Image (cartoon, rainbow, N blue to C red):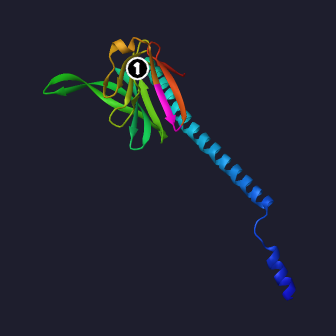
Amino acid sequence: MKKTSSKRKLNNRGFSLVELIVTLAIIVILAGAAAVTVSMLDSSYVEDAERGIKDYISLCRSKSMSVSASDWYVTVAKEDADYYVYLYKDVKKIVTEGGVDKEITETVLVEKKKIGRKISITYRVNMEQPAKAVTEEKGLEFHFDPATGKIVKVKSDGGYVDSDYMASGIGYIGISRNDYEINLKVFFNTGKCERE
């Protein structure tokens, strides 16, 4: 018996070269699969945000032309770590104060939808301008003309965009996460939005 146990000790010298190569191959395959999964997650987050923005711009344009209200607009903004898209309408009301009728405008939130987390959204009115981040303090807002459906006002970076910049006819929304990016074109004259 002593001969058997000493023989076993001599043959137990660690991993063979084949075992080591197989182990490394498995590790490389798993790392590649993980990288593909992360890339797919990045693209799905960005594409979900793209769909949300496009859907709400289209919905707001449609509602502005079909439902009577003084103003319909869509806002993209960041709230904590999440991005949301909001659909608002301004409703005119008559109120009586001291026996005098006054017309007031009340802003009503119609819908709110979370469109993304851990993404970045930027906006530029034309390609000559630098892209500006959409943040909690500085959202992005599009107002529509009820008669034509075109975009008549854009609020970006805390203020309304100068009409001279809007004369270019196109605004750009960038949505990104890590290295994956989608750019949307917003056509001011039609109120429509499409992927660049």
Q: Residues within 10 Å of mark 1 (few under 14, many from 20)?
A: many
Percent coordinates x, y for residue 108 in the rendering:
35, 31
Decide: is 179 above or below 153.
Answer: below
> Which residue, given by chain and number where applicable, does mark 1 sit on?
125
Percent coordinates x, y for residue 53 in the rendering:
48, 29
Q: Is residue 67 left or right of residue 17?
A: left
Residue beneath the point at 82% across and 83% down: 6
The kind of secondary structure element at disc 1 is loop
Q: Is residue 174 left or right of residue 73?
A: right
Q: Residue furthest bottom?
A: 1
Specify whether residue 188 is in view: yes
In magenta, the rendered stretch is 173-178
Percent coordinates x, y for residue 167 in the rendering:
39, 11
Percent coordinates x, y for residue 169 in the rendering:
44, 13
Quadrant housing the N terminus: bottom right
Q: Amino acid at mark 1?
A: Val
Q: Nearer the viewer, residue 29 or 66?
A: 29
